[in-house]
Image: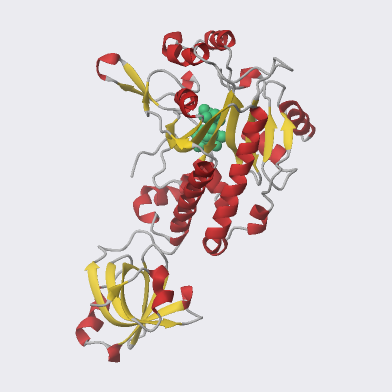
Amino acid sequence: MTEHVQIRELAEHVGDDVSVLGWVHNLRSSGKVAFLIVRDGTGLVQGVMSAGDVSPEVWERLEGLDYEASVKVGGSVREDERAPGGYELSLTDLEIVGPSAEEYPIQLKEHGVDFLLEHRHLWLRTPRQVAIMRVRDEVVKAIRDFLYEQGFVNVDTPILTGSIGESAGTLFETEYFDLGAAYLAQTGQLYNEATAAALGRVYCFGPTFRAEKSKTRRHLTEFWMLEPEIAWCDSECNMRIQEGLVCYIVERAVERCRDLLENELERDLSKLASARAPFPRLSYSEAIERVQSLGSSIQWGDDLGAEDETLVAQDYDRPVFVYNYPKQAKAFYMKENPDDPRTVLCDDLIAPEGYGEIIGGSQREDDYDRLLARIREEGLPEEAYGWYLDLRRYGTYPHSGFGLGLERTVAWICGVPHIRECIAFPRTLNRLYP
Ligand code: NSS
């Protein structure tokens, strides 16, 4: 029995007889010599088979091969500079594990995006999609490593919630036994304001849901959000942690996924190299002046739209903080700015190159009366917020936190224009299949 190796391990097996299990990426044959490219998710390898070196039975199996059939190939590993990946297999064996039925729907020619999304279960096998999923995995690992090193505890929060979250308008509702309506979580933040008072520094990381009827390239109805919550941390401290985290993520992704980013995704890495601390900071009012001077019709009090964010970002080669937005543009739980009560102590981190907001964060309102007043002003169901208000009655404490959108961050790092490619099975306004 030859040893089964992953394609990424071939370098350690030069001269050995090995077998590789994978899928047929490409096949050419001249009648006497066949070139078979196999992929296994860790890489691609070309196998070369000569009719003279194998039994007629094995050679005939090539006839039955189509794109994406699953195969087991056996042969010896050779170093070859010209081969993709640097190694080649001199094939002596081929077994078809699962043939590919009819014509494989995804051909090398360009397809429209609707077609690709309809075939997302197969589209994921293409090297570009594999590269994006690998970068996403590296980003997730980097996030968890960074937070672990900084003493954060992972506390995941419920996905089924009572009526509590970011804003009432964009909740997905479902029936919950005799208790009436439950909602899919828009955020885990409020729960982790409770656990931060138990553990100090916590984070949740999971899917969050927004019934937003937007069709932009930055919106999903289900997306993954990292949400740290930090006791004894003000808005300034919050921004410093965000900056440190984002620099760490980018550096790790470039270090460990350089080849995928450069060669598969054709990312201009010089654009990521400049993402170094300190990130520039603009107050909301400064940002408004700047985008107005660039022709935007935005008025003081409005939230920045996608186009305004792009205008703000264009002055910089790295992410930029916009801080202290007007109260009316932001969520009820943000702490009033003592120096200008029209505004709240918050920040959005806007990625360069038009990728827009990747983080939204704030210091939380820790004063019982002011928080209750905000809940009433917003017309939120007060009874659902009893436990949340308790946190201000029993040992209230200054605290801050933020939410980082995973798909938006991965899109920026990969240089992918639309975030739907940054999650395996995107959920958008008009797609639940596959
Ligand atoms: O709505 S946020 O600005 N903030 C929160 O949900 C807070 N509760 C976070 C916190 O302080 N713990 O969303 C945070 C980020 C935002 O910057 C985006 O990067 C991302 O979440 N986000 C989205 N990504 C994809 N699709 C949609 N619809 C989306 N909405 C927000």
Q: Position of residue 196 (x, y in %)?
A: 49, 27
Q: Quadrant of residue 172?
A: top left
Q: Is 81 drawn above or below residue 130 in the view shown?
A: below
- Location of the C terminus (image quadrant): top left
Residue occupying image coordinates x 45% and y 63%: 109
Q: Position of residue 379 (x, y in %)?
A: 51, 10
In the depicted view, which residue is nearer to us: 172 or 6? 6
Tell me how the rendering is colored. Answer: secondary structure
- Location of the N terminus (image quadrant): bottom left
Q: Quadrant of residue 332?
A: top right
The reply, left or right, for residue 173 in relation to residue 135 is left
Can residue 307 be seen by looking at this rendering?
no
In the depicted view, which residue is nearer to us: 8 or 286? 8
Can residue 68 be seen by looking at this rendering?
yes
In the depicted view, which residue is nearer to us: 11 or 22? 11
Residue occupying image coordinates x 43% and y 14%: 387
Q: Is 262 drawn above or below residue 299 in the view shown?
A: below
Q: Position of residue 187 (x, y in %)?
A: 46, 28
The reply, left or right, for residue 53 in relation to residue 142 is left
The reply, left or right, for residue 176 in relation to residue 138 is left
Which residue is farthest left?
A: 57
The count of marks equals 0
Which residue is farthest bottom?
A: 52
Residue occupying image coordinates x 54% and y 47%: 411
Q: Position of residue 214 (x, y in %)?
A: 50, 32
Residue occupying image coordinates x 32% and y 86%: 31
In the depicted view, which residue is nearer to us: 344 or 91? 344
Q: Quadrant of residue 206?
A: top left
Q: Is 311 drawn above or below residue 174 in the view shown?
A: below
